[in-house]
Amino acid sequence: MVVFIVLASLDNVTIGLVPPLYSPISNDLGVREAAIGGVTAGSILVAAVASVGWAYFGDRFNRKPLLMIGTILWAAGAAATAISDSYPAFFAAQVLASIGLGAVASVGFSVVSDLISPKRRGLVMSFWGLSQGVGTLAGTLLGGVLGAGDWGRPFVVLAVVGLVATAAYVFTADIKRGESEPELQKIFEAGGEYDHRISTHDLKGIARRRTNVWLILQGFTAQLVFGSFVWLPRLFQAKAEALGYTTEVAIVIGSIFATLFQLGGVFSILGGLVGDRLQRRTPRGRAMVASIGILAGIPFYVILFFLPLDVDVPSDGGSGAIALGVLASIFTSPVIGISFVVALLALAMTSANAPNWYALVADVNPPEHRGTVFSLGNLVNGVGRAAGNGLVGVIFRALQSSFPPPLNFALGLAVFQAFFIPTGVMYWLASRTSPKDIETVQTVLRERAVVDSAEAKS
């Protein structure tokens, strides 16, 4: 479990690495920042499309080799990114990394869902989701601190980590499909295996399962917002530049603030716990927690974007001195202290989304469908995230003629919060359909257990 959770964070390290470095990469490659943002958006989309293929094969065959191949691919993409000397080379390297990332996300989810009993699914999935949030933060911090002077350096570090991650897979056990389901315990006690595998004929049934529809569709509007968040370092960088700091110093300041202000994601553990507890009382519980959390976070994000930046760091100091100055400002500047609290509240609310989404995908689908359903949701998420990442950049440029930085960044990010509203509504609709879908899956698994355990004994 520890290995898979740690490795799950690495795909988001890769995604979070580039945004803090938009300025130096664009200057070095001779393109505009929006072009580099377009690569990030395209990479997210490629990873999402690739995850569908990886997941389908993962639901049919041995999952460990697929995870190892995927990890090697994204490590190779990171290494190629570090030595890219042109925009096409940079684009191709990021696409290669994204293809590998598709396996880590979708196949990894399928494995982890087989390690968790339903009653604790929200809690453990909160660690799975948190690890990915931590990965984004680590990527932002790694990119801003290590890459401020040499943007290729953090990609070299990531490539080495990828090789270590590949070796780590060797020591993980082959997890039996469906081994955590109470309804299937008769099969394993009889010495049998759960041999059901996905086929193309199952795709219609997946699409007809109403909760799947809401869980997949909500990802588009939610990820429009989350996709825009990759520009948070750029917002804080612009605020720092408005205070008179150089671009290099402002990049470090922006990356550290963006990292600090996303620490509220740790509250996803609380969201998972609350979802588990409420789910034991009502089968609508998980979806209701996600719906309320998403909607409640909107006002806190809007406030955060417009709060001023009040920071005093040494302009001629290194990254360490700048980081210490930023950390000290949380306690010495009332404005920064308030911003930090507001950011924690915003992330605490919306972080209830991830663990309950993961848990619901597992709850309303049999084991052999979970990787594929996850990947379909991930595909829609990727489209939404890529669109959010790309469209918000266009909005920033459109607003800049009337609202100079950093106000154009703050306004653009605030406008995108409106997409959280339909996300909350779709979770509420999922809370109405999930009880029936959960009951249907449990009934099917019980019936299969009776037949398969009898065959195993004979």
Image: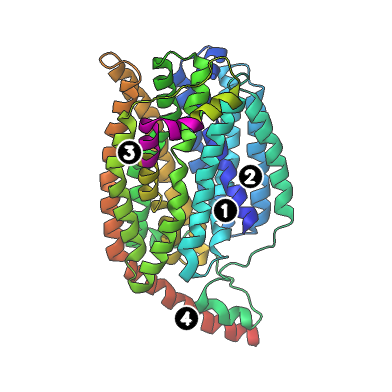
Query: Which residue is more in the foreground, 230 or 363?
Result: 230
Find out whether the residues at labels 3 and 2 contact each other: C-beta distance under 8 Å.
no
Crowding at dot 2, Cα within 10 Å, few <14 / some 14-19 / many 20+, comes out as many
Tell us which disc is closer to us: 1 or 3.
Answer: 3
Q: Determine which of the numbered discs, if any, sits on residue 447 in the image.
A: 4
Find out whether the residues at labels 4 and 2 contact each other: C-beta distance under 8 Å.
no
Q: Is residue 329 magenta?
A: yes
Three-letter amino acid code of the residue under disc 3: Tyr
Check the picture and name the quadrant holding the C terminus. Answer: bottom right
Compute the Cα span from label 1 to label 2. Answer: 10 Å
Image-quadrant location for residue 81? top right
Q: Determine which of the numbered discs, if any, sits on residue 70 in the image.
A: 2
Compute the Cα span from label 3 to label 4. Answer: 47 Å
Mark 4 or mark 1, which has the lower sequence index? Answer: 1
What residue is shown with label 3? 301
Helix, strand or loop at label 1? It is helix
* 111 in relation to 36, above or below: below
Q: Determine which of the numbered discs, if any, sits on residue 107 in the image.
A: 1
Residue 261 visible in the shown view: yes
Residue 2 rendering spot, x and y as whole percentages: 63, 56
Three-letter amino acid code of the residue under disc 1: Val
Residue 24 rendering spot, x and y as whole percentages: 54, 17
Helix, strand or loop at label 3? It is helix
